Image: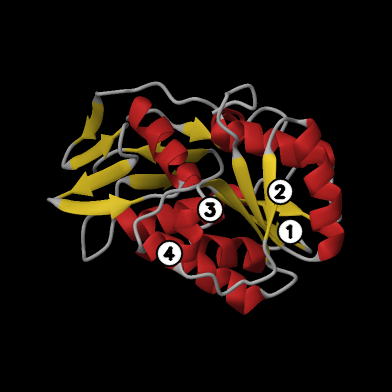
């Protein structure tokens, strides 16, 4: 999705007035249509009427309500990109984002370039792919952004999808943390490298649940590999 499209690209901002005021101006200049909402207890009907392309939630403003809204969207089957604003980049904060099924996070104080880069990443046009990736009993539908293992459908956030896709495109190959960061997060990623451990932990919980054998193996001191053992 691009700011140059004739249809307005609405980005919902659930945040305080300081960020909303700053971000709204930058989003408008970049060609997006910001929608500022003070009510974090929006219903599904209210949300769908807004025709939103992306949601940005300020977890530092109202953590409980923000996370509840994330769960509302995912429980209703929405795969719309969700970004969370965090005060600190800690493992606990990233875990909270993952547990809420947010796709990514942005640190405060607000940085225009970082925000626009993330928006561009998540709203860029996606080719209509009809193929599926397969590894043993695991299938990844590239169109639906959904994994299936033993007939069990597994919904993934965008980052979990990209991470699993990278593994499935390179089965049996030991991938270093640096390679994973560059190919999944981007070569200019500035965050902590242990973000990989956090995401792999939650990806494993999804694709290796209910006693299914491990597929993503840790290679101590090197990285990770997708293989059956």
Q: Residues within 10 Å of mark 4 (few under 14, many from 20)?
A: few
Badge 4 or badge 2: first in the primary sequence: 4
Q: Is residue 78 left or right of residue 102?
A: left
Which residue lies under the disc numbered 3? 50
- Please say if 53 is above or below 76: above
Which residue lies under the disc numbered 1? 89
Residue name at image x 64 percent, y 72 percent: 39
Q: Which mark is residue 118?
A: none
- Mark nearer the viewer, 4 or 2: 4
Res 48 quadrant in image? bottom left
Label 2 sits on a secondary structure element that is loop
Along the line of sight, the residue nearer the viewer: 96 or 84: 84
Badge 1 or badge 2: first in the primary sequence: 1
- Mark nearer the viewer, 3 or 2: 3
Badge 1 or badge 4: first in the primary sequence: 4
Distance CA(mark 1)–CA(mark 2): 8 Å
Q: Where does residue 224 sit, x and y in percent of width and height?
A: 45, 40
Q: Where does residue 176 sit, x and y in percent of width and height?
A: 54, 34
Distance CA(mark 1)–CA(mark 4): 33 Å
Check contact, mark 1 vs mark 2: CB within 8 A.
yes
Which residue lies under the disc numbered 2? 192
Please, which residue is most extreme toward the bottom here?
Answer: 64
Q: Residues within 10 Å of mark 2 (few under 14, many from 20)?
A: few
**The N terminus: image quadrant:** top right
Q: Is residue 35 left or right of residue 213?
A: right
Along the line of sight, the residue nearer the viewer: 160 or 120: 120
Kindly tell me whether residue 100 is visible in this rendering: no
């Amino acid at each position: 999705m691009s700011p140059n499209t004739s249809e307005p690209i609405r980005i919902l901002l659930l945040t305080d007035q300081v960020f909303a005021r700053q971000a709204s101006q930058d989003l408008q200049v970049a060609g997006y249509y910001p929608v500022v909402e003070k009510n974090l207890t929006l219903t599904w009907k209210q949300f769908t009427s807004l025709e939103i392309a992306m949601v940005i939630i300020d977890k530092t403003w109202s953590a409980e309500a923000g996370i509840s809204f994330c769960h509302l969207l995912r429980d209703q089957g929405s795969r719309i990109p969700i970004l969370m604003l965090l005060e600190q980049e800690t493992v606990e904060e990233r875990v909270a984002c993952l547990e809420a099924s947010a796709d990514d996070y942005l640190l405060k104080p607000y940085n225009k370039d970082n925000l626009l880069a993330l928006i561009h990443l998540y709203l860029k046009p996606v080719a209509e792919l009809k193929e599926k990736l397969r590894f043993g009993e695991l299938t990844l539908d590239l169109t639906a952004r959904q994994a299936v293992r033993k007939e069990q459908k597994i919904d993934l956030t965008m980052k979990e999808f990209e991470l699993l896709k990278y593994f499935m495109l390179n089965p049996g190959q030991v991938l270093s943390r640096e390679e994973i960061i560059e190919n999944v997060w981007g070569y200019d990623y500035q965050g902590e490298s242990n973000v990989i451990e956090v995401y792999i932990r939650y990806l494993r919980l999804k694709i290796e649940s209910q006693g299914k054998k491990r597929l993503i193996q840790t290679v101590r001191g090197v990285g990770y590999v997708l293989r059956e053992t």
